[in-house]
Image (spheres, rainbow, N blue to C red):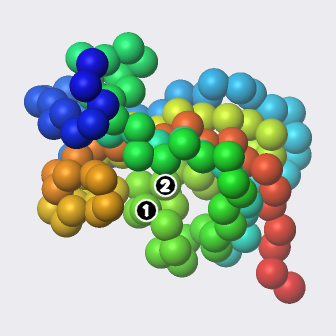
């Protein structure tokens, strides 16, 4: 498929305001992400496209570099901010985030307005502010 421009699929199968998620790699680590904790993750991102293998359309983030944010403080996508709670260090999850919990109706770099996104996120570290 042509990856030079994003494909905007029909999103009938995703309900608004609900993030779909599945565990790709489980972890038995006791440290979990909670509201107020600082987390470090790696992630890759695609435009959600149910017509493509793995529902992965145009890849807008190849990941690789760790990213840190405070959970519940609005420092990342609302859908990720809510869904990472309870995730364990070492765990990897796939999140399908509806547009209204991602970038909404705004263009964001190569992501068209109204796009649902698929993120693969691995939780590397959790620390709690004292």
* Dot 1: element: loop
x, y percent for residue 56: 38, 27
Residue at image coords 15%, 30%: 9
Q: Residues within 10 Å of mark 1 (few under 14, many from 20)?
A: some
Position of residue 68 measured from the top left corner of the image (x, y, whole percent): 68, 67
Question: What mark, if any, has residue 77 been given in the picture?
Answer: 1
Along the viewing direction, whichever of 61 and 48 lies nearer the viewer: 61
Q: Is residue 36 above or below residue 110?
A: below
Q: Quadrant of residue 54?
A: top left
Determine whether, in the image, residue 7 is placed left or right of residue 81.
left
- Left or right position of 56 against 25: left
Could you classify mark 2 by the number of other residues whose Cα lies within 10 Å: few (under 14), some (14-19), or many (20 or more)?
many
Q: Is residue 34 visible?
A: no
Total of numbered circles in the picture? Answer: 2
Q: Which mark is residue 44?
A: none
CA–CA distance in space, label 2 to label 1: 5 Å
Q: Position of residue 22 (x, y in %)?
A: 53, 28
Snapshot quadrant of residue 29: top right
Residue at image x 23%, y 47%? 115
Q: What SS does tag 2 mark?
A: helix
Placement of 47 over or under 109, stated as above or below: above
For disc 2, the marked residue is 80
Q: Quadrant of the N terminus?
A: top left
Please tell me which residue lies in front, 58 or 93.
Answer: 58
Residue 43, visible in the rendered structure: yes
- Report whether 83 appears left or right of 13: right
Instruction: Specify the quadrant of the image occupied by residue 44.
Output: top right
Q: Is residue 105 above or below residue 38?
A: above
Residue 67 horizontal/vertical position (percent): 66, 62
Q: Are marks 2 and 1 in contact (CB under 8 Å)?
A: yes
| Residue nearest the viewer, comparing 117 with 8 | 8
Determine the residue positioned at 41% across, 55% down. 79
């Amino acid at each position: 498929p042509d990856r030079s421009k994003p494909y905007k699929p029909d999103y009938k199968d995703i309900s608004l305001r609900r993030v779909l998620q599945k565990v790709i790699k489980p972890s038995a680590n006791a440290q979990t992400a909670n509201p107020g904790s600082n987390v470090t993750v790696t992630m890759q991102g695609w435009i959600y496209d149910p017509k493509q293998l793995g529902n992965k359309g145009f890849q807008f983030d190849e990941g690789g570099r760790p990213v840190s944010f405070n959970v519940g403080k609005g420092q990342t996508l609302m859908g990720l901010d809510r869904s990472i709670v309870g995730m364990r260090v070492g765990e990897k999850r796939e999140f399908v985030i509806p547009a209204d919990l991602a970038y909404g109706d705004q263009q964001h770099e190569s992501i068209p307005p109204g796009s649902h996104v698929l993120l693969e996120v691995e939780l590397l570290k959790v620390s709690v502010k004292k």
